[in-house]
Structures are given as structure tokens and as C-alpha cells.
């Protein structure tokens, strides 16, 4: 398969400059010969910060302002759309501009910035289809499509929002402004109350376009995976409460993010104070992690005996616990016979 040079777009505000820098360092490491340009949609970032980020890969990186007012112009009347200041509420919708960028570039990939790249992501893209995605749950998308099309049993494809790729050929599938169509669908989803919170509004419009225009999309599995499901993944998405800069477990489990952060801090004179949320493990650094795993390894051999003893005592309460940590289990389970 011929591999086109791809333009990558991301977005951030002044709170997450370190995160977009981390992504760029990884992209440069693994995709050096395959990236045409990196465009950062941004808001409220000072020129000094922009210049430092651009210096990571000066000939490739450009910044494009996307303010809250720009978003409000795009969406028109705000209607029932839920707004949040979390991470710059409007920047999550900058991914709709992927279609505008395709007017100038052959291949465009959107990436969220709470990710960690571990290999050449461009090598997994499909260039003989309209695009490449990872699939998410289509439940709300299907209900919306059934409503607006007055049909039953629609089974559409909804991309996950962190990784979305389209090729220029998608522009031949419609004469309409696909970027503006995404904003129209976004508003309609809220006005018709298919969405209530702030989740999925940046994903479902792409699913609507894929269904409406019968787009040929390739789906892949080795990217956009959560940390707890990241075996063989080359693009880990540490979403919600798993972010590398707020979850100590994510931070210490994926040391390459830490390495990228050190490159940013040391080479570009940017000290980052990372404050982790409270956690219960007695681990503060790699030494503690090593000792914890070493001790757990010793403890593991007597686990069956301890489990029997603990459950013998709990039996009078008609409870049974299973705290074994295995490949397929990541929770503490309590069972009751009631």
C-alpha cells in the first residue's frame, strides 16, 4: 500500500501546551518521514509558548487560532448545546475542520492530545478508502439516524473521537460543506435531546456523514486504546481520569510519556509541575514501584490460602471476595448470596 504524507491536526489551550508538545515529540520520533505538516488549533496561548512548541519541529508545525467566538459562529445559535470550560470546551469540536484541511492536503489525521504514540501511526492509515477510524458504541448514533430517517434497525459506524482520519477523496462524496454539516448535526443532536452531557458530540456527526454518504471507511484496532486495554497498541488514549499527567498509575505504567515530558522540560526550558490525584498505592516513584511489584510477587504465592481464610470469615455475612489481579480482571469483586 502506498503511504501518503499525512497532515496531523490537534488542538489545545494554554493549560495543555505540555501535552501537545509531548505528542509532537512522539510523532517526530516515529513518523519523521511521513508527516507533511502538524497544525495546532489553539486558543489563549501566548506567542512565546507557540514559538517554543514550533521549535520542536520548526518546518512542520503551524498554529491556527480557533477561539470561542469562532466556535459560536460555526454553530450559530447555541441552542441546547452544553458548554464546559474543561480543557477549552470548544476545541474538542475543532476536529470538524478536518474536511476544510482536506481542501489543501491529501490526507489529514486528527489526534487528541491525551495520548501516547509508540510507533509509526501513519503506517496503519488506509489511503485507498475515504478514511481510517476506530469504532465506538453506535447506540445514540443509531437512534438519531432512525429518528431523522424514519427507519428501523439502522446499524451505523461511529468513530471514536481521539483518532479520525480522512483522505481527500471524501470531498468527492458530497458537494456540501462537510465541516459545517458536522456543526449542524451537533446542534440538532442537542436540540432533539439525543445528547444531554458534553460527551459524544464531537464523534456522532462523523458517524452521520459516514452513513449518509456511504463512505468507505477502514477500521483498525491497534490504536486509540485505553491504558487497561493497551496490549499491542501503538497509540494509547489515557482519557478521563486516566490521563498521564493526573493519574499516577498511567504516568508510571507508560514511561515513554515521562521521557517525552523530560525532553520538553530539559530541551525547551519548560518545567512542568505534575500533581497527581490521590491514590491508595504506597508508590511515589520507580523505586517504590519496584518494591511493590517485588512484594506482590512474593505475596501472590500465598494468595489462595489467604483468600480461603478471608472468605471463611466473610461467610457469616454471606459475602465472598475475589481480589486476584489477573490479565482479564482489573477490579475488586464482592459477591453476595442474598
Image (tube, rainbow, N blue to C red):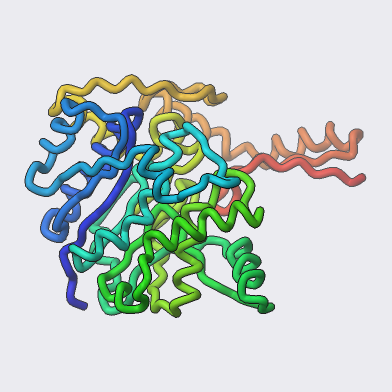
Displayed quadrant of residue 259: top left
Towards the viewer: 116 or 313: 116
Position of residue 193 in the picture relative to residue 31 (left or right): right
Q: Position of residue 335 (x, y in %)?
A: 80, 44
Residue 70 x/y as whole percent: 35, 43
Total marks in image: 0
- Is residue 77 toward the left or the right of residue 287 in the image? right
Quadrant in the picture for residue 116: top left
Q: Position of residue 18 (x, y in %)?
A: 28, 31
Q: Is residue 113 above or below residue 265?
A: below
- Name the residue at 39% across, 31% down: 245
Given residues 251 and 95, the one toward you in this image is 95
Q: Residue at x 53, y 53 (%)?
A: 187
Residue at the limit of the structure toward the left, as seen here: 59
Is residue 83 visible in this depiction of the protein?
yes
User: Where is residue 212 shown, x and y percent of the image?
Assistant: 49, 75
Residue 46 as seen in the image, left or right of residue 275: left
Quick one: 54 or 201, which is closer to the camera? 201
Does residue 255 appear in this view? Answer: no
164 left or right of 187 in image: left
Tell me the quarter of the image containing the C terminus: top right
The residue at 30%/30% (across/down) is: 44
Q: Say which quadrant the N terminus sits in.
A: bottom left
Which residue appears at 28% of the width and 32% of the height? 17
Amino acid at each position: 500500500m502506498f503511504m501518503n504524507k499525512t497532515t496531523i491536526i490537534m488542538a489545545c489551550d494554554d493549560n495543555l501546551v505540555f501535552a501537545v508538545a509531548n505528542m509532537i515529540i512522539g510523532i517526530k520520533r516515529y513518523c519523521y518521514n511521513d508527516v507533511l505538516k502538524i497544525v495546532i488549533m489553539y486558543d489563549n496561548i501566548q506567542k512565546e509558548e507557540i514559538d517554543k512548541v514550533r521549535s520542536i519541529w520548526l518546518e512542520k508545525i503551524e498554529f491556527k487560532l480557533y477561539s470561542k467566538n469562532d466556535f459560536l459562529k460555526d454553530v450559530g445559535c447555541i441552542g441546547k448545546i452544553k458548554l464546559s470550560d474543561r480543557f477549552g470546551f470548544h476545541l474538542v469540536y475543532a476536529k470538524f475542520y478536518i474536511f476544510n484541511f482536506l481542501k489543501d492536503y491529501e490526507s489529514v489525521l486528527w489526534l487528541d492530545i491525551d495520548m501516547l504514540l509508540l510507533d509509526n501511526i501513519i503506517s496503519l492509515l488506509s489511503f485507498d478508502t475515504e478514511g481510517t477510524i476506530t469504532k465506538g458504541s453506535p447506540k445514540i448514533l443509531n437512534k438519531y439516524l432512525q429518528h431523522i430517517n424514519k427507519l428501523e434497525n439502522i446499524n451505523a459506524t461511529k468513530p471514536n473521537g481521539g483518532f479520525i482520519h480522512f483522505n481527500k477523496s471524501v470531498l468527492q462524496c458530497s458537494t456540501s460543506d462537510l465541516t459545517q454539516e458536522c456543526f449542524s448535526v451537533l446542534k440538532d443532536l442537542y436540540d432533539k435531546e439525543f445528547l444531554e452531557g458534553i460527551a459524544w458530540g464531537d464523534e456522532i456527526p462523523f458517524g452521520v456523514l459516514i452513513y449518509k454518504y456511504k463512505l468507505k471507511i477502514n477500521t483498525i484496532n491497534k490504536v486509540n486504546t485505553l491504558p487497561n486495554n493497551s496490549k499491542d497498541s501503538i497509540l494509547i488514549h489515557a482519557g478521563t481520569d486516566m490521563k498521564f499527567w493526573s493519574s499516577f498509575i498511567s504516568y508510571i505504567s507508560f514511561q515513554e510519556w515521562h521521557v517525552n515530558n523530560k525532553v520538553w522540560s530539559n530541551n525547551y526550558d519548560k518545567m512542568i509541575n505534575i500533581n497527581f490525584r490521590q491514590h491508595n498505592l504506597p508508590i511515589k516513584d520507580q523505586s517504590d514501584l519496584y518494591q511493590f511489584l517485588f512484594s506482590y510477587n512474593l505475596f501472590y504465592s500465598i494468595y489462595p490460602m489467604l483468600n480461603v481464610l478471608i472468605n471463611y470469615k466473610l461467610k457469616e455475612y454471606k459475602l465472598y471476595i475475589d481480589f486476584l489481579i489477573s490479565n482479564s480482571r482489573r477490579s475488586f469483586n464482592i459477591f453476595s448470596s442474598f
